[in-house]
Amino acid sequence: MSKGGLRRLDWVRSILNRLYNSALEERKKAWESKQLGVTLYDQIKGLTAQRKDDPEGLGSLAVRAERGMLTRLERAFKAYFRRHQAGEKPGYPRFRPIARMETIDIVDPKTTMVKKRARGYAIRPKGFPTIRLFPSRPLPTECSLKALRIVRKPNRVYVDLTYEVEKEPLPKCDSAVGIDLGVRKRAMLSTGERVERNSRDWPEIRRQQRAISRCKKGSGTRRKRVGRLVAMRHREGVRNRNACHRVTTEIVRNHGLIAVEELDVKGMTTKWLTKKSLNREILSQTWGLLRIQLRYKAEWAGRELVDVDPKYTSQDCHRCGARNKPGRSETYRCAACDLRMDRDHNAALNILRAGAVALGSVTWVNGPYVLPEQ
């Protein structure tokens, strides 16, 4: 997108951000002054008069984008009341600065909004700049478009399209796999496959942070360098997410039973300041993202996903069940049966066994799943 298009998109974001904050203020004042609740329907109904009063602002934009902003506010209030009823301490929905308004949702989009071009696709809702799309595969434009989202990131603009397609479950698979999550290796499978750890370019990150600290606060140079660092971290996040997608898709395709250890990442990374380097490495492996992707992909494909308690999975011998303490060694040695193997591989086999037993209808000895030989 050109610089002029980015400026136009930022102007659109400012108008929608103003709408969000004014709608939040309306709800807040109505409750504080008259104890009245303002619904999403009330605010959408009043949107018509606002568009007439502001033809150069709200009136010049697609009404579906403005309804999407009001719908987001409604979701925020529903989440607030849901947590409040559950006994939690939720924060009241807050006013948002323009910097936090990155996403624009267009509710009830029409399939005709996405136009085929000689090279790629293009979308241009009313009042928006033309956004060119270059997807890696053809879009199913013959299907119904259910959701359209525009995301403004530091280095580029992203468009998320959701189409309604027929569900095609994967063929039945009798294989099973256990997954041990780690730091030296991101994951180890019970089949012996290993997933390499996610490595971040810490020297370059620190170099850019030092360059930012040398700049005067509020200067243009500081803003440019901050933007450069934000763009770099965003690129790393996208690469990491794509790598997780490749791994989880391969696992779901090849296995009918997936057992993964259920780790308390928050608890593991909030204890002891002295292990902050380990906390940083744990967070950089994004175990939570792997588990989230495995869960929804397994549900879509009709696979069985089991969460396993990781207690003693790294100490027990998968062959004889004896409990040993491997310490920091990468090799697991069993004093009872003289087993020698990779410690993470042994843990993955224990996780698979626990997952197969926990499933109920599947046992380690015999069952519908083909389990690894002892």
Image: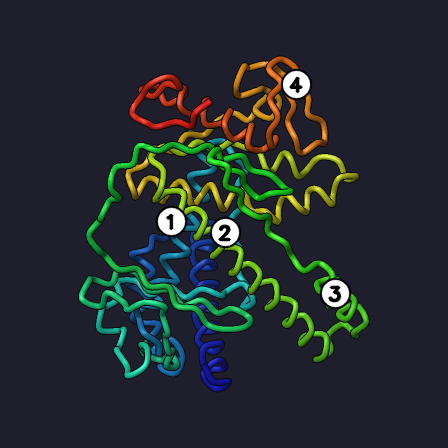
Q: Amino acid at mark 3?
A: Gln
Mark 3 or mark 2, earlier in chain: 2
Mark 1 or mark 4, earlier in chain: 1
Quadrant of the rendered image containing residue 184: top right
Mark 4 or mark 3, earlier in chain: 3
Do labels 4 and 3 touch, CB within 8 Å?
no
Q: CA distance from mark 4 to mark 3?
A: 44 Å
Mark 1 or mark 3, earlier in chain: 1
Mark 2 or mark 1, earlier in chain: 1
> Can I make out residue 214 in this image?
yes
Q: CA distance from mark 2 to mark 1?
A: 15 Å
Task: Give the foreground label among 2 and 4.
Answer: 4
358 lies above or below 221? above
Q: Residue at x 53, y 55 (%)?
A: 240
Binning the other alpha carbons within 10 Å of mark 2 as few (below 14), some (14 to 19) or many (20 upward) gives: some
Q: Amino acid at mark 2?
A: Pro
Residue 110 position within the rendered picture, expressed as x and y whole percent measured from the top left: 23, 68
Residue receiving disc 4? 324
Binning the other alpha carbons within 10 Å of mark 1 as few (below 14), some (14 to 19) or many (20 upward) gives: some
Residue receiving disc 2? 93
358 vs 250, nearest the viewer: 250
Residue receiving disc 3? 209
In the image, 316: left or right of 130? right
Secondary structure beneath disc 2?
A: loop
309 vs 321, nearest the viewer: 321
Q: Residue at x 58, y 19 (%)?
A: 316
Q: CA distance from mark 1 to mark 4?
A: 61 Å
Residue receiving disc 1? 37
Q: Amino acid at mark 4?
A: Asn
Secondary structure beneath disc 4?
A: loop
